[in-house]
Image (cartoon, grey):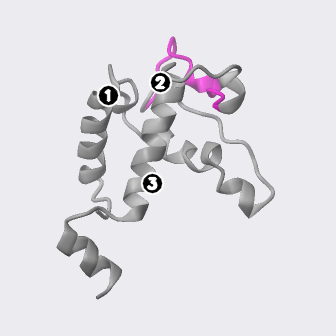
Amino acid sequence: MSYEERLKELNLPSLAYRRLRADIIQTYCYLHGHYKVPNIDSLFPLSSKGDTRTTNRGNPLKLTKHRSKTATRQNFFTQRVVNHWNSLPAEVATAEDTNTLKRRLDKHLANKHYQL
């Protein structure tokens, strides 16, 4: 039985979907202070356009992606999540709490026809 068939039979989302969802939830928790991390700005630097006092498209908490020279570095959590986080609409990224984020994120990913 193939991986896709097993997922369908067990009614589970794909590993890629679960990883993306978990990455976005973890990023939300870091950015909204759920984890007490010193120097969070060095872990997830907000872009200069990410200033909440300015108007910009999408979510106001856009992250800066640093250039990486190696493929290994590109797969670090802080690198792989940036493009996905920056593409989120404001109502997802600025959710009031984690459960609201999860609900809105699932709806957003379903609208994007992300492979479950």
Q: For mark 1, give the secondary structure.
A: helix
Residue on which the image places disc 2: 60
**Residue 78: horizontal and vertical position, in percent?**
63, 42
Q: Earlier in the sequence, mark 2 or mark 3?
A: 3
Q: Earlier in the sequence, mark 3 or mark 1?
A: 3
Q: For mark 2, give the secondary structure.
A: loop
Q: Which mark is on residue 8?
A: none
Three-letter code, disc 1: Glu
Q: Residue furthest top?
A: 53
Three-letter code, disc 2: Pro
The residue lying toward the viewer, choosing from 75 and 55, is 75
Q: Residue furthest bottom?
A: 1
Tell me what residue is drawn at x 75 percent, y 48 percent: 67
The magenta-colored residue range is 44-57
Residue on which the image places disc 1: 91
Alpha carbons under labels 2 and 3: distance apart = 23 Å
Q: Nearer the viewer, mark 2 or mark 3?
A: 3
Q: Nearer the viewer, mark 3 or mark 1?
A: 3
Residue on which the image places disc 3: 19
The secondary structure making up most of the magenta span is loop
Alpha carbons under labels 3 and 1: distance apart = 21 Å
Mark 1: few/some/many CA within 10 Å (<14, 14-19, 20+): some
